[in-house]
Amino acid sequence: MAFPATAFRRAVTASAMTAAIALGPLLTAIAQAVPLTGAGATFPVPLYERYIAEFKKSNPDIDVSYQGVGSGAGIRQVIAGTVDFGGSDAAMTDEDMAKVKNGVILVPTAGGAVAVVYNLPFIPNLKLSRSVLPDIFTGKIKKWNDPRIAKDNPGAKLPDSEIKPVVRADGSGTSFIFTNHLSAISSTFKSEIGVGTAPKWPGNPLKGKGNPGVAKGVSGAEGTIGYVEYAYAKQNSIQQALVENKKGQFLPPSIRETNKALGTVAIPENNRVFVGDPDEGYPIAGLTWLMVYKQYDSPEKAAAIKKLVSWILNDGQKLNASLDYVRIPAKDAKRIADSVNSGVKP
């Protein structure tokens, strides 16, 4: 018996509608990825952008975003609970951690160097000693041709011009790493400026927001000197000074020398490490951390955070060196990943 075309179309349409209604919740669940929003340190932004892109390939059901707003802002947002995770190059203090309602776990993700960058086009490989560098940033050494700088750079035609420091305008873990080192090697610097994410610099230095802002400030004017994360200095082809370490060696920042420095420091159970004056290697170095909550408002977000941290501390570590960051040692990475898997609850 022939089946009328109109009736056939109606039957197909009805079947399609029934299927759509039945599959609707499933399709919606597939389409809606779990969102994870993060904000904080600019130091690891190039690395975190790569992490997120690679993580997404194998985890399309998790939508991760990260905004580089500075370590200070990252810590404040974690305390306020306005992000799903934060980033900081300065480990949270006990006081700050106590303010986080849902508890917090510090997750070191990479190590890196802070480069001392400068703009003197005809002076390559500028050497800065352990006594000179702190005095430049306390304003005690004001001219490029100061005898103390000249002593470490024989033959260099240093200009008779003012040294123009460029510092961070925002609360910054890069500032923390830099001031932590200068405080460790100079009692004068420690007493006059000290360690902090937002130090009060003397005089009227130029200021830039984030590592990109400082890099731009140094690149844009001769006679400037500043400090930025090593990857920014390298990627922007800014001159990097050779900095004297505890052994008396003048070294540029590099993965090899930063590995040496961080290799002298053990990561404790609470994951807080303060690298002041390492015994060897490039001396201005530190770690960067994710800050994740111990408790999330949904099982989905808790599971997503665990998956993200586990991926970063395993597959993600393979990307670190290619972007000029140091890996977290494998034994520490496993312990930290295990602590997040057991410590994060919905």
Image (cartoon, rainbow, N blue to C red):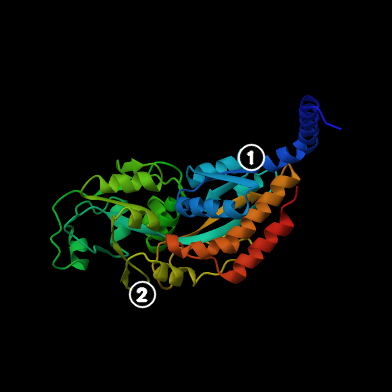
As drawn, the residue found furthest toward the right would be: 1
Whether residue 196 is visible: no
Q: Nearer the viewer, residue 319 or 137?
A: 319
Judge left or right: residue 1 versus residue 270. Answer: right
Indicate the secondary structure of the residue bearing disc 2: loop
Mark 1 burial class by Cα count in 10 Å: few <14, some 14-19, many 20+ = some
Whether residue 216 is visible: yes
Percent of width and height locating residue 159: 14, 54
Q: Nearer the viewer, residue 213 or 170?
A: 213
Percent of width and height locating residue 316: 55, 60
Amino acid at circle 2: Lys
Percent of width and height locating residue 186: 37, 61
* Residue pointed to by mark 1: 81
* Residue pointed to by mark 2: 247
Query: Quadrant of residue 229 in the image?
Result: bottom left
Amino acid at circle 1: Gly
Query: Quadrant of residue 30 in the image?
Result: top right
Q: Is residue 334 above or below residue 42?
A: below
Q: Nearer the viewer, residue 69 or 176?
A: 69
Judge left or right: residue 29 versus residue 87. Answer: right
Residue at the spot 46% in from the left edge and 44% down from the top edge: 171
